[in-house]
């Protein structure tokens, strides 16, 4: 089975003492495998571990991994007493120096920057890792399912298009055999060798037929064959170009140009395959 490089997968769960953890994966086309992470503060040290998990199941594509942790609401407050003492010392000094009689109130003190804050629940990376990796694996399974589903659709489309190429090639082969006999009857024996050398497209037909069969075999084989299929379509395009250029028959040249257009469409779809 072949897989598309595009897909989406997510999974989330409620973890005691940690809150709700969600993992979201998005994958787009890319020549190689590239992982981009968006992690909460304090979890950057887990990036290499997460990347290895992704690399174990995905070979090509640009993977965006976003992890979000919605912990319990803060249950307490924090007063920075050391900073408060510094504020009071400086404010009392200013009051004495400039003879300011307005007294300091509690309300004005807690409004000073950095004095009052809520206590945050930030789980440590080591503690959360044992819970996070299973969630990532579940999200990866969902991602693989969507990639495989799209890959299955792509495989069917590519098989159909390659069958059309085979039919076109059969028609070209039949047309060439018929036209070459008629043309050889009209030219003298001395000119036949030169004519065959410049106009014979039998070799191009055979090579193109081989590439089409190889292309279909790779699709049937499955796996990470995107790069191989891309190379094969390049070779198919090259043979179709030569075939159209060498042919002395307008019908064959026109059919070869149609094949070129079909191959280009195939190659556009191949760009999506892992």
Image: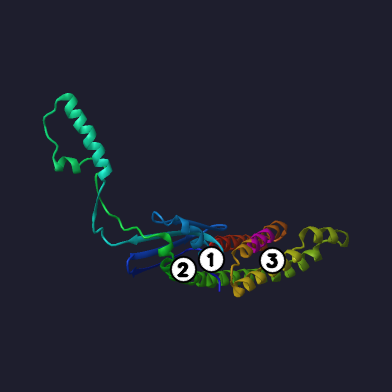
- Tell me if mark 3 has few (under 14), some (14-19) or many (20+) residues whose alpha carbon lies within 10 angstroms of its own: many
Residue 171 image-quadrant placement? bottom right
49 or 31, which lies in front?
49
Q: Which residue bears the numbered disc 1?
A: 58
Q: Is disc 1 placed on a helix, strand or loop?
A: loop
Residue 191 image-quadrant placement? bottom right
122 or 183, which lies in front?
122
Q: Does the magenta stretch include residue 234?
A: yes
Q: Tell which circle, 3 or 1, labels the residue nearer the N-terminal end.
A: 1
Q: Residue at x 53, y 73 (%)?
A: 156
Q: Which residue is drawn at 60% across and 62% down?
A: 263
Q: Where is residue 4 in the image (x, y as percent from the top left)?
A: 51, 66
Contact flag, marks 2 and 3 (Cβ < 8 Å): no
Contact flag, marks 1 and 2 (Cβ < 8 Å): yes
Q: Tell which circle, 2 or 3, labels the residue nearer the N-terminal end.
A: 2
Give the magenta range.
231-239
Q: Where is residue 238 in the image (x, y as percent from the top left)?
A: 68, 58
- Tell me if mark 1 has few (under 14), some (14-19) or many (20+) residues whose alpha carbon lies within 10 angstroms of its own: many
**Quadrant in the picture for the N terminus:** bottom right
Magenta stretch: dominant secondary structure = helix
In the image, 52: left or right of 198? left
Q: Give the CA distance from mark 2 to mark 3.
A: 39 Å
Q: Which residue bears the numbered disc 2?
A: 140
Q: Give the CA distance from mark 3 to mark 1.
A: 32 Å
In the image, 47: left or right of 118? right
Q: Which residue bears the numbered disc 3?
A: 208
Q: Where is residue 126 in the image (x, y as percent from the top left)?
A: 43, 62
Q: Give the CA distance from mark 1 to mark 2.
A: 9 Å
Q: Position of residue 89 (x, y in %)?
A: 23, 34
Please state which of the two labelled residues, at mark 2 or mark 3, is closer to the viewer: 2
């Amino acid at each position: 089975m072949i897989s598309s490089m595009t897909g989406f997968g997510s999974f989330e769960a409620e973890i005691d003492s940690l809150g709700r953890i969600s993992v979201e994966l998005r994958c787009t086309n890319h020549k190689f495998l590239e992982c981009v992470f968006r992690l909460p503060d304090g979890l950057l040290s887990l990036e290499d571990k997460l990347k290895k998990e992704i690399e174990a199941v995905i070979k090509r594509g640009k993977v965006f991994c976003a992890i979000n942790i919605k912990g319990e609401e803060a249950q307490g407050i924090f007063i920075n007493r050391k900073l408060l003492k510094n504020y009071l010392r400086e404010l009392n000094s200013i009051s004495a120096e400039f003879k300011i009689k307005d007294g300091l109130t509690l309300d004005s003190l807690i409004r000073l920057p950095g004095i009052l804050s809520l206590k945050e629940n930030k789980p440590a990376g080591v503690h959360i890792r044992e819970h996070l990796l299973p969630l990532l694996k579940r999200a990866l399974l969902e991602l693989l399912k969507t990639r495989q589903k799209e890959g299955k659709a792509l495989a069917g489309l590519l098989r159909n298009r390659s069958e059309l190429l085979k039919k076109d090639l059969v028609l070209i082969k039949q047309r060439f055999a018929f036209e070459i006999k008629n043309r050889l009857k009209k030219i003298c024996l001395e000119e036949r060798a030169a004519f065959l050398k410049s106009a014979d497209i039998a070799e191009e037909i055979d090579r193109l037929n081989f590439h089409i069969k190889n292309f279909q075999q790779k699709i049937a084989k499955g796996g990470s064959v995107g790069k191989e299929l891309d190379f094969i379509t390049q070779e198919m395009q090259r043979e179709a170009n030569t075939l159209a250029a060498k042919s002395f028959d307008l019908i064959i040249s026109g059919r070869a140009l149609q094949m070129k257009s079909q191959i280009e469409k195939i190659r556009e779809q191949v760009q999506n395959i892992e």
